[in-house]
Image: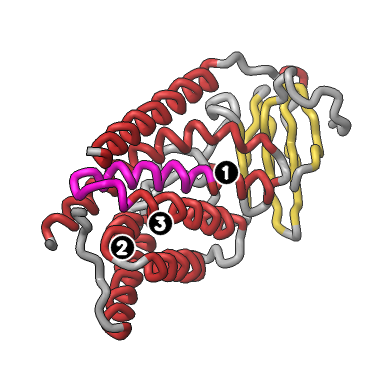
Amino acid sequence: MNKKKAQTALMIAAAAIFAAAAAVSVYQLRRTKPNTVKIISDGKVLYTLDLSRESDREIIVEYEGRRNVIVIENHDIYVREADCPDHTCIKMGKLSQSSTQIVCLPNKLMIRRAYSSEESGTDGTA
Amino acid sequence: MAQRKRESGGSASELTRLSLLTAMALIIFIVEQQVPFPLPIPGAKLGLANIITVYAVNRCRSGGVLLLVLARIFLGSLFGGAFLSPAMIFSLAGGLLCLAGMLPLRKILDEKHIWLGSIFGAVLHNTGQIIAAVFVMKTAAVIGYYPFLLVIGCIAGAFTGLTAQIIINRLK
């Protein structure tokens, strides 16, 4: 029956989507991580930092009156304070332990590694 | 055609039914919010309230399902303190794209493959979420989360879909 064929096709499609997503996830987790980190607020790059050369300090980023306190410590970076309700960015912990990037959706803040393949030569230095 | 029974009674009985389903979905949604999700991926969760969505997709008219999902998202974000926030826009985009896929799929899938429709619903929900996030965050970098969301979405979608399938077949 036609319906049965469609169901089998859908099942194969679902399996393919799952396998592809899992493969890309594993690939992303295994990719070597560069030391250069970008702090992006509302689409704008505020800081580009080379973590291997940064000394310990705090950076406060404000967005529409709400703030995130970002801490650089032992060549690692994490968010210590945020006045959003979910605190996901704090729970994501240190960037070295995070899979890809630290994101605070309510305050439109992103801390991510700058892979050389993408958007090199962005302005903004520490 | 082995069409599943769908509610086509008077508007009052349908309205009552939809309200009840909305209430159940909201309770599940709020309870789930209290349980922290172990993986630090923004936007990722089990989406247990979608058990109700999958049930409604298979048992209610398309317009009714749309109303149910919209009410769930608006009231849910109002209760959760995320009203009109980016998070609400993401779930709105995800929810609508999810319905756009699941409503046509219910004609193809029989009562033993409801879980399959739910997986596609989850995948489409993730797709809508990410597309909305690209526009709200004004960066394509959030696409990096897409594969992670898809893996969790497929598993969670299969789980919620299977739960809904068991409920639908028991309540026949």
User: Residue type at mark 1?
Assistant: Ile
Q: Residue at x 19, y 45 (%)?
A: B112
Closer to viewer: mark 2 or mark 1: 2
Per the rendering, the mark at residue B33 is: 3
Check the picture and name the quadrant holding the C terminus of chain A: top right
How far apart are labels 2 and 1 at the CA level? 25 Å
Question: Dots 3 and 1: beta carbons under 8 Å?
Answer: no
Q: Position of residue A3 (x, y in %)?
A: 26, 41
Mark 2 vs 1, N-terminal side: 2
Observer-nearest residue: A73 or A14?
A: A14
Q: Relative to B141, is B14 on the left or the right?
A: left
Residue B58 is a magenta residue: no
Mark 2 vs 3, N-terminal side: 3
Write down the residue under mark 1: B130
**Which structural element holds mark 3?**
helix
Check the picture and name the quadrant holding the N terminus of chain A: top left
Question: Dots 2 and 1: beta carbons under 8 Å?
Answer: no
Point out the stretch of residues depicted in magenta: B106-127
Q: Relative to B169, is A93 on the left or the right?
A: right
Observer-nearest residue: A48 or A42?
A: A42
Chain letter, disc 2 residue: B
Q: Relative to B127, is B6 on the left or the right?
A: left
Majority SS type along the magenta span: helix
Q: Residue at x 27, y 34 (%)?
A: A5
Q: Residue at x 39, y 68 (%)?
A: B68
Write down the residue under mark 2: B56
Are the residues under marks 2 and 1 on the same chain?
yes
From this view, report whether residue B132 is shown above or below residue A58: below
Where on the picture, by quarter, is residue A63?
bottom right
How far apart are labels 3 and 1 at the CA level? 21 Å
How far apart are labels 2 and 3 at the CA level? 22 Å
User: Residue type at mark 2?
Assistant: Ala
